[in-house]
Amino acid sequence: MKSGPVALRGAMDAALHPLHPTVPQYSCLGLLGQRPGLSGAELARGVFVTRQSMNVVLRGLEERGLVTRPATAPHGRELPTELTSAGRDRLDAASSAVLAIQQVMCAGLTPARQLALLETLALCIRNLSTDS
């Protein structure tokens, strides 16, 4: 039996494969959908990859016309990244595929148990987010 993270990653890889984003690319698109204009360094932190890995992710997304970055930085060295309309469309399609995984993953949980799970995960996130 696979561990939770391995099973989830495998399911996400399989669902996203026909749409062609990898899980890190999907995570990057999702983060940009929520917070447009993030730099590569900010995206790397948000997606839990190295800056070097994020540069590869961004180059791939940019080559496919899903994100855009200016040729020169408007301030300092950081290049703000934005979704293109094609990127938004791909994010919407990928999000639907991931939502289907969530529905399968939560099958059999009552609404009350789903709420308890979300509250527990939110508490875990808060615990990790607090400055000690």
Image (cartoon, grey):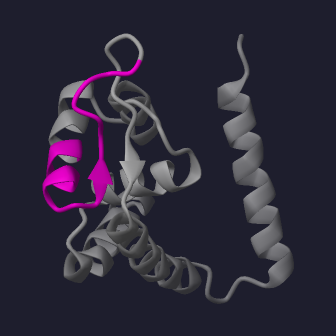
Q: Say whether residue 59 is magenta.
A: yes
Could you tell me which residue is drawn at 52 percent across and 86 percent down?
Answer: 104
* Nearest the eye: 107 or 13: 13
Could you tell me which residue is drawn at 21 percent across and 76 percent down?
Answer: 17
Q: Magenta residues, as a range?
A: 58-74
Residue 96 position, x and y percent, is 48, 81
47, above or below 85, in the image: above
Q: Say whether residue 16 is magenta.
A: no
Can I make out residue 8 in this image? yes
50, above or below 30, in the image: above
Q: Quadrant of the N terminus?
A: bottom left
Left or right, 123 with respect to 87, comes to right
Could you tell me which residue is drawn at 44 percent across and 61 percent down?
Answer: 4
Residue 7 position, x and y percent, is 36, 68
Left or right, 130 with respect to 89, comes to right
Can I make out residue 1 in this image? no
Residue 59 position, x and y percent, is 16, 44
82, above or below 126, in the image: below
Could you tell me which residue is drawn at 71 percent across and 10 percent down?
Answer: 132
